[in-house]
Image (tube, grey):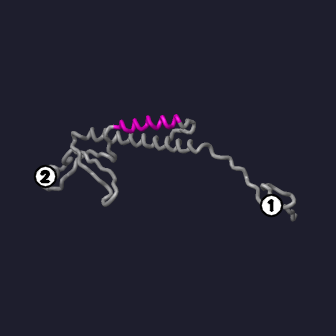
């Protein structure tokens, strides 16, 4: 849920933006995507993994993420000893993304604050009606009942 920054002054928003940039810069190494840990059978009929009840080779990690371009996905096998490190990097990305989302909200509030409150617009007189602003006019209304 987005925070409401509309009650803050321009100065407060600018100060908050500086603090947020410091927090963003302090986020440790991160990566986006997902991590699966599992076993895989190699497909060789003579391999131990082909025996009934065998889980397969592993465990091993597979980190994947979507990417632009051909294939649309990128992956990397992760040694089991590095799985916790990759999980921490994925958590760091979630924290980074949340900070960026808040940073954008603050910047939008700052842009809005720089514009000031919206100007009140009155209804303009219509020259075709002799300068009247509208509403009902008994002289122009005819009753056919």
Residue 20 inside the magenta-drawn segment: yes
Q: How crowded is mark 1: few (under 14 residues within 10 Å), some or many (20 or more)?
A: few
Eye-nearest disc, 1 or 2 = 1
Secondary structure mostly seen in magenta is helix
Residue 65 position, x and y percent, is: 32, 50
Q: Where is residue 67 in the image (x, y as percent from the top left)?
A: 33, 54
Query: Residue at 48% across / 35% down in the picture?
Result: 16
Secondary element at tag 1: helix
Provide the residue span drawn in magenta. 11-27
The residue pinned by badge 2 equals: 47
x 81%, y 59%: residue: 130
Residue 109 vs 130, above or below: the answer is above
Residue sitting at 32 percent across and 44 percent down?
31
Query: Cα distance, mark 1 to mark 2?
Result: 93 Å
Taking depth in this image into account, of 27 and 72 the one nearest to the observer is 27
Q: Hey, which residue is sitting farthest bottom in the picture? A: 144
Q: Can residue 53 be seen in this view?
A: no
Q: Mark 1 points at which residue?
A: 129
Question: Between 10 and 40, which is closer to the camera in this rendering?
Answer: 10
Q: Which residue is drawn at 21% across and 43% down?
A: 79
- Which residue is nearer to you in this view: 79 or 23? 23
């Amino acid at each position: 849920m987005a925070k409401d920054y509309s009650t803050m002054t321009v100065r407060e928003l600018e100060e908050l933006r500086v603090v947020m940039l410091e927090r963003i810069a302090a986020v440790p190494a991160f990566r986006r995507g997902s991590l699966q840990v599992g076993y895989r059978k190699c497909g060789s009929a003579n391999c131990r993994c082909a025996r009934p009840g065998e889980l397969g080779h592993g465990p091993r990690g597979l980190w994947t993420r979507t990417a632009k371009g051909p294939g649309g996905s990128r992956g990397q096998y992760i040694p089991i000893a590095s799985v916790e490190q990759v999980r921490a990097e994925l958590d760091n990305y979630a924290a980074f993304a949340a900070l960026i989302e808040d940073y954008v909200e603050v910047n939008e509030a700052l842009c809005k604050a720089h514009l000031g409150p919206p100007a009140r617009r009155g209804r303009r007189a219509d020259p075709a009606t002799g300068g009247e602003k509208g509403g009902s006019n008994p002289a122009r209304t005819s009753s056919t009942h």
